[in-house]
């Protein structure tokens, strides 16, 4: 989840370092040049390298622009840290699949170390045998197809409640001249995803903590993980700056609050292992069982359990709600495509039990195509979580030393004219026919919404199932348009900054029950 957005304190530090760099230019010149076997490199500054080019907080766009000028593989310096960025499908395949065994570790990010128990989770842990065992447990016991199926009732119940909340909100709209004022669709979608993920991860047992408090804490954690610490790019002295700017204190406070919530929740689960409330076993129950009994000779400890369950919650909520949000935004901006998807959903769905059922989703090809097209244009993590090379290697003939940070710009790959015809257009039909088999798991390197290889997201099935079910019910039960009669062509999808950017402003849509 870690990328390159800078918080306000770090920006002040960067300005200071920029001034120092300018003085260094006068004294030392523009540096020593680069080795012939190094990838092309955009000009940087002494000391800070290329950091000054990331001040706007959308690094995937900055790096895509640099790739257009310098090629699909470039070398940059983030302070004193060397990094390589790849922006083409062929290079992504080399990193994520062909040489996955080399580029499979993670740089140890300061905020992740401080909040995720020293990176003892799956997402940010360095590559090791212990990490392999943790991922196996997640894939086999927590996020396998059968386990995802077991939460079907949870999904359908929460989606039914979501439909009723949308219906209630639609009745509260102001209508002027037959035009509706609109409702906050983003907030409704966030509530849905948090409800489903919370029930799947924790059941109804949150240790007496209010769900709203958990949601606020997860938002704080997400923001922290999207903040690059000065010590990440200047390891020698950066820790002092992080302390002086207050980032160290913020990390400590957040970690303490999170751990308090985790402890209370685990204690409640340990005291009520029988699920007397009738709720199905949740993911935390599974993890505590493995911690007690072991699995294939490997036992989790309490810290492992906390790190894993936080990963499940963080990855599941953010990526899912933003996928639904962006898909709705694209469909409203492209009303012809919306009409096609809506017609298909209403022909396939029976309306049994008042909701679209999960088994009906399999027949909704246009719905799947619209969601895939959205993920092509708006991947949940546009710049995949950085990898790190574990030993010296070569990539497209260039030397890549050990401990080099490697970033895959999946946002740029999804908009590459060499891979996609009319790449900037929203055209779901490109995922029909032969391309309809293009899946979310990254086997086709042109389409990498959830990464690929060892470090690919293990929760794809869970996230996509919920997103598809929510979208199908939104299409079935309601008609949607921009509020106040706004022209769809004037509607701009402006993304926020951050590691996993949603829309900059909440999605406000006029809704009419069907």
Image (tube, grey):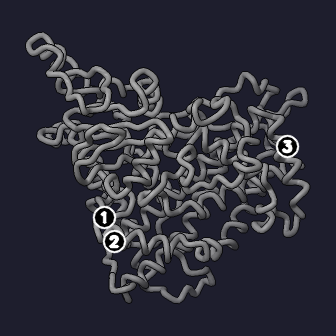
The answer to whether 323 is drawn above or below residue 133 in the figure is above
Secondary structure of the residue carrying tag 2 is helix
User: Where is residue 312 drawn, in percent x and y?
Assistant: 48, 63
Q: Nearer the viewer, mark 3 or mark 2?
A: 3
Q: Residue at x 25, y 33 (%)?
A: 37
- Asked if residue 487 lies left or right of residue 57, the reply is right
Q: CA distance from mark 3 to mark 2?
A: 46 Å
Residue 510 visible in the current orientation: yes
The label number, if any, that marks residue 137 in the structure image: none
Q: Residue at x 19, y 35 (%)?
A: 80
The answer to whether 353 is drawn above or below residue 324 in the figure is below
The answer to whether 146 is drawn above or below residue 491 in the figure is below
Residue that label 1 marks: 120
The one of 152 and 449 positioned closer to us in this rendering: 449
Residue 256 visible in the current orientation: no
Secondary structure of the residue carrying tag 1 is loop
User: Where is residue 487 drawn, in percent x and y?
Assistant: 79, 24
Q: Earlier in the sequence, mark 3 or mark 1?
A: 1
Residue that label 3 marks: 340
Q: Earlier in the sequence, mark 1 or mark 2?
A: 1
- Asked if residue 106 lies left or right of residue 30, the reply is right
- Asked if residue 277 lies left or right of residue 14, the reply is right
- Asked if residue 503 lies left or right of residue 248, the reply is right
Say few, some or many: other residues with alpha carbon within 10 Å of mark 1 (under 14 / 14 to 19 / 20 or more).
many
Say few, some or many: other residues with alpha carbon within 10 Å of mark 3 (under 14 / 14 to 19 / 20 or more).
some
Q: Residue at x 17, y 26 (%)?
A: 47
Q: Residue at x 84, y 47 (%)?
A: 342
The label number, if any, that marks residue 304 in the structure image: 2
User: Where is residue 182 drawn, in percent x and y?
Assistant: 76, 37
Q: CA distance from mark 1 to mark 2?
A: 6 Å
The one of 392 and 348 positioned closer to us in this rendering: 392
């Amino acid at each position: 989840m870690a990328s390159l957005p800078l918080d306000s304190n770090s920006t002040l530090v960067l300005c200071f370092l920029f001034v120092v760099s300018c003085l260094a230019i006068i004294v030392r010149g523009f540096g020593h040049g680069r080795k012939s076997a190094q990838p092309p490199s955009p000009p940087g500054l002494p000391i800070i390298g290329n950091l000054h080019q990331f001040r706007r907080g959308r690094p995937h766009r900055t790096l895509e622009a640099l790739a257009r000028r310098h090629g699909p593989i470039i070398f940059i310096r983030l302070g004193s840290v060397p990094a390589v960025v790849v922006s083409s499908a062929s290079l992504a395949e080399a990193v994520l699949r062909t040489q996955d065994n080399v580029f499979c570790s993670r740089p140890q990010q300061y905020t992740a170390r401080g909040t995720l128990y020293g990176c003892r989770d799956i997402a940010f842990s360095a590559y090791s045998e212990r990490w392999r065992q943790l991922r196996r447990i997640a894939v086999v016991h927590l996020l396998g197809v059968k386990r995802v199926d077991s939460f079907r009732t949870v999904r359908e119940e929460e989606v039914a409640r979501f439909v009723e909340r949308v219906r209630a909100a639609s009745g509260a709209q102001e209508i002027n001249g037959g035009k509706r004022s609109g409702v906050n669709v983003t907030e409704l979608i966030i509530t849905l995803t948090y409800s489903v993920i919370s029930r799947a991860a924790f059941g109804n047992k949150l240790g007496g903590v209010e769900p709203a408090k958990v949601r606020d804490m997860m938002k704080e954690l997400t923001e922290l993980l999207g903040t690059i610490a000065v010590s990440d790019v200047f390891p020698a002295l950066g820790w002092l700056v992080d302390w002086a700017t207050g980032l160290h204190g913020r990390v400590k406070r957040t970690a303490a609050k999170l751990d308090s919530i985790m402890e209370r929740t685990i204690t409640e689960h340990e005291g009520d292992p029988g699920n007397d409330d009738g709720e199905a076993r949740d993911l935390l129950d599974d993890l505590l069982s493995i911690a007690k009994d072991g699995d294939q000779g490997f036992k989790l400890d309490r810290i492992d359990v906390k790190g894993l369950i936080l990963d499940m919650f963080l990855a599941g909520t953010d990526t899912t709600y933003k996928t639904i949000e962006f898909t709705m935004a694209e469909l409203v901006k492209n009303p012809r495509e919306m009409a096609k998807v809506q017609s298909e959903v209403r022909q396939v769905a029976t309306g049994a039990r008042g909701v679209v059922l999960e088994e009906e989703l399999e027949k909704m090809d246009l719905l799947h195509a619209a969601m895939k097209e959205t993920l092509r244009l708006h991947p949940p993590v546009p710049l995949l979580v950085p990898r790190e090379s574990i030993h010296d290697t070569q990539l497209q003939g260039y030397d890549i030393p050990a401990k080099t940070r490697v970033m895959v710009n999946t946002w740029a790959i999804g908009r590459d004219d060499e891979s996609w015809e009319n790449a900037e257009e929203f055209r779901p039909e490109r995922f029909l026919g032969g391309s309809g088999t293009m899946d979310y798991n990254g086997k086709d390197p042109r389409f990498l919404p959830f990464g690929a290889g060892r470090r690919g997201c293990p929760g794809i099935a869970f996230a996509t199932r919920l997103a598809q079910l929510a979208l199908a019910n939104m299409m079935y039960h309601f008609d949607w348009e921009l509020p106040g009669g706004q022209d769809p062509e004037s509607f701009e999808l402006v993304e926020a900054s951050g590691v996993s950017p949603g829309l900059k402003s909440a999605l406000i849509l006029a809704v009419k029950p069907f």
